[in-house]
Every structure is written in structure tokens, then in C-alpha cells.
Amino acid sequence: MTTKLDKTKSKAAKKVARQPPQLGLELDESVGLKVSIEGDYDALRNVARNTNLIEGLVGQIAKLGSPGQIIDEEASNFALGFIDSMNPRDTAEALLLAQMAVVHQATMVMARRLNHTNNILQQDSAERALNKLGRTYVAQMETLKRYRSKGQQTVRVERVTVEQGGQAIVGNVTKGGVCDEK
């Protein structure tokens, strides 16, 4: 059975010429967490311009996991995919996008918990956390938008009414020059 999601994926696959970055995670008791990177992560590597930074970011994403001690390859790949798909322009954007991905995932966890509460105390706790995370995500989006706009000017249009016999000056008016006291 073919679903709409399958059709969307196949259309997206045709549009994407590159293989997006993908993490492979394996927990080895002697070494710890083994991380393998597949696909094209050159865009992220070029943004970071520093091997230590990109390896550190990928390592942090790999350790993201699920609630508890479980390593979650799907959650890590979601975060990496989010960062990659948002096309960060520099290191600051890449780091902000990583935080946004984590906040989004935490928001979804809290939404799930709110839907499965057993008492008022759990409901209040999950609701507060969900509310804070939602506001944090919105603030991060506004920060990203402001950062990407690089301080572009805003034009403000105001209405001025001048009655018959009146005068109007349009623009910034400052007092200056020499005053003649005669």
C-alpha cells in the first residue's frame, strides 16, 4: 500500500541530488558510543570551518537520545536532519539550530506526557514545561530570523492630515543652526 507520505518521500528524493547526513550509533561497552557518519555532511563541515566544532556538535547530537539512558538513533538523525535542512550560514546558526532541534524534541516529549497524565500534579508539571519549551522555541525562531536579516531597515508609513491653511513637515526635524536674537 502506498501512502501520501511515501509519494512525498519519492518526490523529495528526486529533487535532492545529495544524500543527507545520517548518523549510525552503536553502544560498545569497551569504547562507549561509536558514531559513524554517512551521506554528505560537507555543507555542515564547511559552515563550521573547524573540524573540532563539527565533530563536537555531531557528538552532542549523537548523545541526544531518548528520555533515560537509551541511545536513540532516530532522535539524533532528526536533529541532524533539521540542522542540515535549515541550511545554516555560519557556526552561530548551526549551534542555534541544534538547540532548536533539541527544544522541539523536548516539546514533543512534554506534549506526549501531558496527553498521558494520571493526576493533576503530573498535568500541571507537563503543562508548565510544555509552555516554557514552546515559548523558548518561538524566541529561538525570532532570534534566527533577526540574525539572518542582518538588521535590515524597516519602513514605517504614517498618515498625516493637514487642514486647510496648515503646513506640514515630513521627515526628522532637529533644531540646529545659529539663532538671531533681533
Image (tube, grey):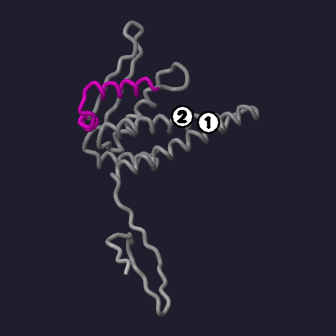
Q: Among all residues in the image, which is located at the extreme right? A: 119
- Residue 29, image quadrant: top left
* Residue nearest the viewer, comparing 92 with 100: 92
The magenta span reads: 42-64
Q: Earlier in the sequence, mark 1 or mark 2?
A: 2
Marker disc for residue 106: 2
In which quadrant is the C terminus drawn?
A: bottom left
Q: Mark 1 Cα within 10 Å, few/some/many (few <14, many 20+)? A: some
Marker disc for residue 177: none
Marker disc for residue 129: 1
Which element is circle 1 on?
A: helix
Separation (CA) of disc 1 from disc 2: 9 Å
Mark 1 and mark 2 residues within 8 Å of each other at the beta carbon: yes
For badge 2, the amino acid type reads: Ala
In the rendered image, residue 76 lying in the magenta stretch gets the answer: no
Q: Among all residues in the image, which is located at the extreme top? A: 30
Q: Residue at x 65, y 38 (%)?
A: 128
Q: Residue at x 39, y 72 (%)?
A: 173
For badge 1, the amino acid type reads: Ala
Which element is circle 2 on?
A: helix
State the predominant SS element of the stretch in magenta: helix
Q: Is residue 155 above or below residue 43?
A: below
Q: Where's residue 45, x and y in %?
A: 26, 33
Q: How many marks?
A: 2
Q: Residue at x 50, y 36 (%)?
A: 103
Q: Where's residue 94, x and y in %?
A: 35, 37
